[in-house]
Amino acid sequence: MQSMRNCIPKKVNKLPLRRNNVGKFKKRNHHTSWWSEVPMAPPDSIFGMVAVFLEDKHPNKQNLTVGAYRDDNGNPYVLPSVRKAEEKMKSGYPSEEEELGIGSEEFRSKSFEFAFGPCNEIAENGLNATVQTLSGTGALSLVAKYIKVHFPQAKAIYLPQPTWGNHAGIFRHAGLDIQYYKYFDYKTFRVDFKGMFEAFCSIPDGSVVLFHASAHNPTGVDPTKEEWMEISELVKQKKFFPVFDMAYQGFASENPDDDAFPVRHFAKVGIKLALAQSFSKNLGLYGERIGTLTVLAGSREERDRILSQLQFIIRTTYANPPVYGARIVTTVLSDPQLRSQCLQEMKGMVRRIVSVRKTLRDNLAKEGSKRNWDPIVKQIGMFSYTGLTPAQVDKMINDHHVYMTRDGRMSIAGVCSQNVEYVARALHQVTK
């Protein structure tokens, strides 16, 4: 019998040549791993900072990087309404069988109503293609893949400058080019509405444009309702396809309905849009990874086709969504008492953050800071765009062990009664 070694053609034994980094050729070592040429991925600006924070042994280290709510003791907060929903669920869901790829109809319906409002004509006419996603990030990733395949005229997506650090990576990974439009005035710490409008006028018609629905991350400043209405008129005129990221519904104004105003107004005036919706922040369901993606259609037949394509992407990515987080959201939003309690708890979280903003500014004044810290109070949501330079952020970390992203974004939710004076002192030291 012929041996396996004799079955291998002799030419295979010749090592293939490959070009090295300086253009010369060298033989590939046949013992080299398949993955020896895989480059290191760029570090994540937030998770990378958290890793450094965890290694820090300083007793007064403070983590103001991640956008996760903390109570006034600096601990993670589980909404009591969520705990009650979990108790109620024990007798209501006897099966752990998986849902269809797009999620349960009740969850999708309740989530859409929470985002777009009750008695909505879009839902009544069946024009919303809504699917369950792996929180807001999963929704953005899903719509990015959908746009790449089914919106071939879109070569790029236009993001606000600045924006959440993961936005560019999500859409670039789907194959879209990344462009930016003016959003923030670094001198006034306000929305640069004039610059935004001028940028939109220069963007090609029919482009894909991303908006933050409320509590803009990282700046904490939003357009007014009147400005949103002007933006919607230009979006309609330019035939843009808007993608809304709504990660903080309820964290801007204490009122989830007000925070959803731009999404609802755009839909009301007939603009077909996509909405990435997350329940990580407002219901505190960070670990459950629960959210939705909604794409508005022009007809039921069009909606069905959109749903089929979204389900196809889901099926070939992770098949079916997890059920536990969806059941919590459905239970809270379906029970009038739990829903009312949850809304009150959202208000409590927002009011604590507002109080912390004022306390931090007051403590900076006590430290003797001559810098204008009023923007901290005027900004909304979980974050404050402090205006610190990367060098000043480095001093915050190296000298005071207070961690924040290098663009100067600070998580106000991570500030509490126990550390506010320490944080204020550190901010004063690096900015005086």
Image: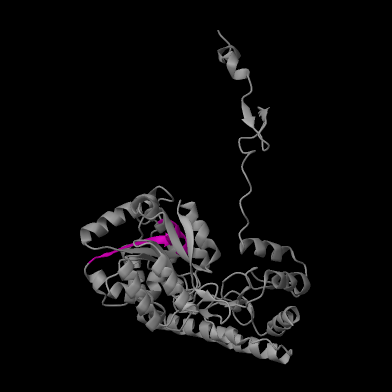
- Is 262 placed left or right of 167 in the picture? left
The C terminus sits in image quarter: bottom right
- Is 279 placed left or right of 359 in the picture? left
Q: Position of residue 292 (x, y in %)?
A: 39, 64
Residue found farthest to the top:
1
Q: Position of residue 57 (x, y in %)?
A: 77, 67
The N terminus sits in image quarter: top right
Q: Position of residue 281 (x, y in %)?
A: 50, 73
Q: Quadrant of residue 298?
A: bottom left
> Quick check: can you spot residue 116?
no
**Is residue 270 depicted above or below 295 in this figure?**
below
Q: Position of residue 109 (x, y in %)?
A: 31, 68
> Quick check: can you spot residue 178?
yes
**Is residue 357 depicted above or below 328 in this figure?**
below
Q: How is the image coloured?
A: one colour
Task: Kindly identify the residue that appears in the image at 36 percent across and 70 percent down.
Answer: 111
**Is residue 342 depicted above or below 241 in this figure?**
below
Magenta highlight on residue 239: no
Q: Nearer the viewer, residue 219 or 313?
A: 219
- Please report the bounds of the magenta region as a residue range: 126-142
Image mark count: 0
Q: Nearer the viewer, residue 199 or 372?
A: 199
Task: Kindly identify the residue that appears in the image at 62 percent across and 78 percent down.
Answer: 386
**Is residue 336 depicted above or below 24 in this figure?**
below
Magenta highlight on residue 136: yes
